Image: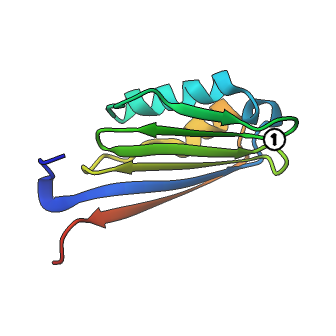
Amino acid sequence: MADLPGGQGCEWVIEALGCDIARLKDLAQLQTVFQDLIGGLSLHPVSETQWHQFPGAGGITGLCLLAESHLACHTFPEYGSLCLNVFCCRPRPEWAFEEYLRETMGATSVRVRRLERSYHTQ
């Protein structure tokens, strides 16, 4: 992380609503989502992703530490929603989160917010 071009990175905060409930409780499905994001954004995990699956009708929480920062998700089957957070210490191009989550998670609505993160005063 010593090389921070321009001293700026980006963070995406994503909410996917109206998702398929079964997919929100499917650990293998979420592992695939993480693999696709890691590959698609050229991210570099520094350890294995940690997962917690809540009992019964509960959802799943996942956290992957990256050389670039982190990738996290929380699913809420009771609300049909998935929340994702992707933080990269280096600039990244836009990624088709909306299309991807509609296809993979059955989302009917996806909101993507991109935050530019500056590491110094300007």
Going by the numbered disc 1, the residue's amino acid type is: Gly
Q: Residue at left 32%, top 31%?
A: 44
**Residue 53 against residue 116 in the figure, above or below:** above
Residue designated by label 1: 58
**Residue 49 against residue 74 in the figure, above or below:** above
- Say how the picture is coloured: rainbow
Q: Nearer the viewer, residue 53 or 114?
A: 53
Q: Residues within 10 Å of mark 1 (few under 14, many from 20)?
A: some
Disc tally is: 1
Left or right: 5 in relation to 99: left
* Quadrant of the image containing the C terminus: bottom left
Q: Position of residue 8 (x, y in %)?
A: 22, 60
Q: Position of residue 20 (x, y in %)?
A: 79, 36
Q: Nearer the viewer, residue 75 or 50?
A: 50
Q: Position of residue 57 (x, y in %)?
A: 87, 38
Q: Position of residue 3 (x, y in %)?
A: 12, 47
- Which residue is the extreme one toward the bottom? 122
Left or right: 104 in relation to 50: right
